[in-house]
Amino acid sequence: MSGIIGSKLNVRGSGPIGKLGTDGQVLTSAGAGKSIAYEDIAGGISWQSVETGSTMTAVAGNGYPIDTSSNTCTITLPASASVGDTLVFSDYARNWATNKIIIDSNGLNYQGEDDTYTVEYSTDGLSLAITYMDATQGWIPTTDDDVTDAPVRGNSEGIFGYGDDGSDTGVTNLVSNVGVVASDVTGVGTARAGLTACEYGGDKGIFGFGSGPTAVTNLVSDAGVVSTDVTGVGTGRRFPAACEYGGDKGIFGFGYTDTYVGMTNLVSNAGVVATDVTAVGTVREMLAACEYGNDKGIFGYGYDGSNQSLTNLVSNAGVVATDTTGVGSARRYSAACSYGYDKGIFGYGYTDTYVSMTNLVSNAGVVATDVTGVGLDRAKKAACEYGQDKGIFGFGGDTLTGVTNLVSNAGVVASDVAAVGTARLSLAACSFN
């Protein structure tokens, strides 16, 4: 299974269970110290012993207390089901927010979507009842009569912004859900280059840092509208990198002040940037970062006086790990984005010449060896997700260009697409909506 449901669903408090909304996380459960009564929704359920394993197979008609104190638990639903079959899962130790449950619908639909989605629930104290309706809708959560939202996955649109076109600019270019780049939108906020961007809040973005050096940020709404400057927090620097983590938060990291640095700054799901977190790993600039595994991130490549290929993983709590030995060609000024819902790709850059090779990142954060480059060799470009499961590299230079290259949901990079908008380099990109 790939994609994500649970981290794009939202249980909001409407009575004891809550509603499913649209902004990204299962937020509330039955309330502090309370449990959900199942007399009306799960009569006749046969409760089983507490399940503590990392995997289990559910049987229709049963209720399962799931204890994820030590690990996540992947629950495989029955391979066949009859109308009215019901299952109940309950957070035994109130720690699903630490170690979530993952539901594998095992070939059947879940809330009207096929099992190319990953269904996750990650709220402490949550209890969940699901009932099989028919082949079209499949399993549907029945703990709230107001469940109406079909799950969504990934962000559908993107935005390239800022950069250097001979001088610093704030111009932006939107990317549609089919990867079409739009003409220039007048810049908002401080014109600058050498900045970075990432997603936050499940459907919004943030540009931050850059030439100056500065720590100023600019939020991007879920409609792709860039806001005026937000006063910088943390150490101003240029050529850092950024990515999403935890499904709805972001992280800025590394860069250059008057020396190479490695501090990070977390971004909340409301777009608020936190103060500096002490550096972990090799300090460097001109690196790239992207999300992988639905809720984790990876910083990779860069320059610390020499080109690097090492990486640093970011946990779903925003904790940066020590260096992982590099794979692929050491280089600086590469770009990265996610694709295929749970994987990533680093691409392009500068070794001692401009290059276009790429390196795929698995959903476990493992970087693969070089894939032969496609399109114009260049560096100082940007990349973001679009169409929920695809990516796009764009702009950059050997000489200034606005050329783009689409990335399929299998990680295959396409040939050059003719430039739209102001040719520039040292820009940033993120997805939204």
Image (cartoon, grey):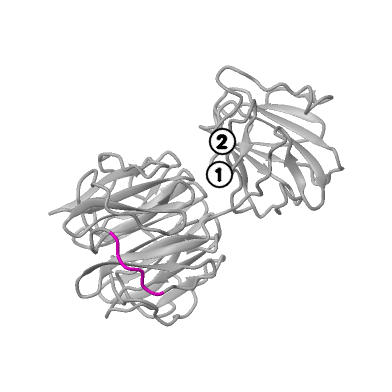
Tell me where the magenta segment starts and ends, as one range: 183-188
Is 313 magenta? The answer is no
Is residue 63 among what the camera can see?
Answer: yes
Task: Count the numbered circles shown.
Answer: 2
Q: Is residue 73 left or right of residue 292?
A: right
Q: Which mark is residue 205?
A: none
The quarter of the displayed image where residue 59 is located: top right
In the image, what residue type sits under mark 1?
Ser
Depth order, front residue of 326/293: 293
- Residue 359's quadrant in the figure? bottom left
**Residue drawn at 63 percent across, 23 percent down:** 92
Q: Residue at x 16, y 58 (%)?
A: 212
Q: Where is residue 211 shown, x and y percent of the image?
A: 19, 60
Please say whether residue 186 is one of the residues in the magenta stretch. Answer: yes
Q: Does 15 sit left or right of 407 as displayed?
A: right
Q: Nearer the viewer, residue 27 or 359?
A: 27
Give the alpha-carbon distance from disc 1 to disc 2, as whole Å.
Answer: 8 Å
Q: Is residue 152 left or right of residue 260?
A: right
Query: Looking at this rendering, what residue extends furthest in the right direction?
Result: 82
* Looking at the image, residue 196 lies above or below residue 276: below
Question: Which residue: 40% across, 58% down?
Answer: 225
- SS assignment at label 1: helix
- Residue carrying label 2: 122
Circle 1 packing at 10 Å, graded few (<14), some (14-19), many (20+), is many
At a point 35% along the width and 78% down the height, the residue shown is: 377
- From this viewpoint, is residue 310 visible? no
Q: According to the image, label 1 marks what residue?
A: 7
